[in-house]
Image: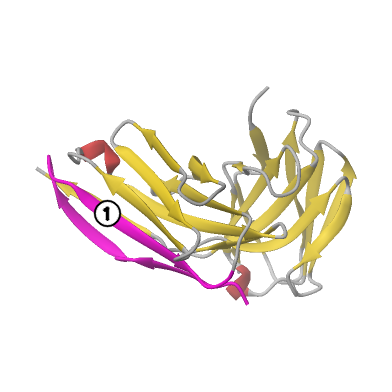
Amino acid sequence: DTEVTQTPKHLVMGMTNKKSLKCEQHMGHRAMYWYKQKAKKPPELMFVYSYEKLSINESVPSRFSPECPNSSLLNLHLHALQPEDSALYLCASSQDPGETQYFGPGTRLLVL
Amino acid sequence: ELKVEQNPLFLSMQEGKNYTIYCNYSTTSDRLYWYRQDPGKSLESLFVLLSNGAVKQEGRLMASLDTKARLSTLHITAAVHDLSATYFCAVDRDNDMRFGAGTRLTVKP
């Protein structure tokens, strides 16, 4: 298995909802990442997990809560989001921290 | 703070001609990447450049790195339509990845 998978592909949620994004890889990669990408903009790094521990948190609001249950899984828990949080959320993984990152297909999120 | 600048931001290319995209960055880095993104899709890794003078080629694309000038170039040879996409350079420093704004390429016959 040589890919990063993300579910769901699309998500529509209200500002009072709680939802989670899921990312999975079975390549034995030890680093996993969450990015946010607004339309026609570059991806922005949100979180980095290295060996299942949070190593970078780019001053992301607390309404985004990452979780790494094991080395293959990465979740992003969403609560009380704002319409401006609507974006494509990309997960990536790399063999080790700092090595080439491989991106999943993304979850397109719309907050109403 | 690590900053990454790409230019041009838009590039309209004629088939068969050669073009170059430039990527400048502000501080020393560990690695430099080039990614391709098709509309509505995720990012595809093209190249990773690790050291000064590194050059990598794949098909019509060639990337190079000059760490002293903090500059990478992506050279396109004899553009064809299927190269139309957005190309990002990204710089990794201490596992903190920063992307350039992206260059939107379109190839016209």
Q: Name the residue located 53 percent from the left edge and 73 percent from the top edge.
A: B26
**Among the 4 quarters of the image, the one containing residue A15:** bottom right
Q: Residues within 10 Å of mark 1 (few under 14, many from 20)?
A: some
The C terminus of chain B is located in which quarter?
Answer: top left
Residue B86 seen from this side: yes
Residue that mark 1 sits on: B20
Q: Is residue A76 above or below residue A8?
A: below
Residue A102, image x, y percentages: 61, 40
Q: Amino acid at mark 1?
A: Thr
Q: Is residue B62 left or right of residue A89?
A: left
The magenta stretch is: B1-27
Identify the subunit bearing mark 1: B
Most foreground residue, B37 or B48: B48
**Is residue B14 one of those drawn in magenta?**
yes
Scheme of image coloration: secondary structure
Q: Residue furthest left?
A: B109
For the N terminus of chain B, give its image quadrant: bottom right
Please indicate, yes or no, whether residue B38 appears anywhere in the rendered image. Answer: no
In-image side of A56 versus A7 (left or right): right
Up-down: is B85 above or below A71? below
Q: Position of residue A82 (x, y in %)?
A: 66, 75
Considering every residue shown, the one lying at the far top of the view is A1
A78 to the left or right of B71: right
Where's residue A55, x and y in %? 83, 59
Residue at image point 85% right, 38% down:
A71
